[in-house]
Amino acid sequence: MPEPQPGARPADGSTPGTEPDRDPAAAEKPTSPPVPSDQPEPSTRPTAADQPKPSDQPEAAATEDVPAPRWSGSASVPPPLPRRPAWGESAEPTPPQPVPVGLPEHQTPVDPWAGVDTGGWDLPSAELPPLPPTTPYPVPPTTRQWSGPPAPPVGSHPVPPPVAPAPPVAPVSPVAPVSPPAARPTMPSRQMSPPAPAPAPARPPKQRRGGRPSTPPAAPPPGWQAPKGYVPVRRRRRWPWLLLLTLACCCGCPAYYGFPISAQYPARAALPEQVEDLTLRQDNRSAETAKQLENEVRQEHLLAEDTFAGVYSTTSGKRVTVFGGTGFRLTPEADAEAEISRLADRYALNAPETVDTGVRGRHERCAVGRADGSDVVVCTSVDHGSIATGVFTRLSVTDSATLLNTLRAQIVQPEG
């Protein structure tokens, strides 16, 4: 509703300073119907903390600037009631927090551990008073054993005695009086023994794996004929072949490799004076050469049991020097190659040649070289029981190998 301006005349033509006389009864009646109040309930009214902060000017000055209306078409609105503070809420309004000036990254960091002693975690602990002694448990009184009768043994439920069958009753005529039956004698009760356990079922006899079944196969029914083209297959026995193979592996292999060893070791050596057209020389020079060769064999073959050395010659001027020793040798082929390699520098030997001896377990090597300005042939023969080496002059490789085998057969004699 618009407020009256100062100096304006009312609508009825009266002056502002004077008011018309009105009937008191009419003055008490409302000039307009009551307007419903738009004020909220006391519970929903704003509190003093939600009200805006009053300005610094006094309230009286504000009321003097705005003149109050002389009359209004509605009743005056009372001021809102103060809100009751909630539980734990402060009655004083919370002052606004000052807004920090500047960005957080431009502010000086604060050390949360400033002024705190962080030297160690060993903090002194307060000593607690000692606990009072606990009350011991009371000693139970001694009990006396019960001296009553012993309890019966726990067993199965007693078996009632068997009831004897009642004797047959003779038919009674309706005329004759019925006499009461005589009392039956009581049978003494007899305790029955528990039933004997049932015998365990007999186990079938064990059958050997791969053996014949205990029961023969069922015979074909009488009159049965095999179909046309049916040939019965006979089961072959394999155990003889397996037995022979086992014997061959267990006995054949050791016999194959052990027979040459047993035939060639042990052996003894002795130099004969005459071998075909060769004669053993007994002069000082030949004896000194033989002694030197025998010492070399002893130094090179430490496991040698016996050594020998000698110089043979013929009437035609051929010369043969033979030396060696006896003893067990596990690898005669490797020993033959090692002996030729040992003599290669002394006699300037060429590449060695392998010579077939025809004896299992014996290996022979021959090579051509030079000694005292003339050509020589050096041959060595090694088996499991001995070693023999010969130096031949004016002979070929084949003749030298044949002559070494002849000398070996006369010098080395197996004892097995």
Image (cartoon, helix red, strand yellow):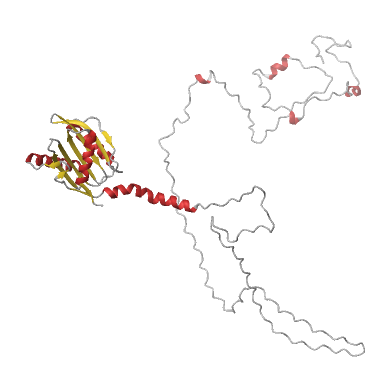
Location of residue 247 in the rendering, given as x and y in whole percent from the top left corner = 41, 52
Residue 171 relative to residue 220: left or right: right
**Which residue is nearer to you in this view: 302 or 20?**
302
157 in relation to 180, above or below: above
Which residue, as the protein is rendered here, is positioned at the far right?
175
Instruction: Classify residue 359 by image quadrant.
Output: top left
Residue 295 visible in the shown view: no
Q: How many numbered discs sit on the rendered protein?
A: 0
**Which residue is nearer to you in this view: 50 or 318?**
318
> Residue drawn at (58%, 24%), measured in percent from left and top?
97
Residue 321 relative to residue 250: left or right: left
**Which residue is nearer to you in this view: 181 or 376?**
376
Location of residue 95 in the rendering, given as x and y in whole percent from the top left corner = 60, 25
Location of residue 321 in the rendering, given as x and y in whole percent from the top left corner = 15, 38
Residue 89 visible in the shown view: yes
Instruction: Classify residue 124 by image quadrant.
Output: top left
Residue 52 relative to residue 348: left or right: right
The quadrant of the rendering that contains the N terminus is top right
> Residue drawn at (92%, 89%), measured in percent from left and top?
175
338 in relation to 212, above or below: above
Location of residue 158 in the rendering, given as x and y in whole percent from the top left corner = 67, 76
**Which residue is nearer to you in this view: 125 or 184?**
184
132 in relation to 119, above or below: below
Which residue, as the protein is rendered here, is positioned at the far left?
284
> Residue drawn at (71%, 27%), measured in percent from left and top?
46
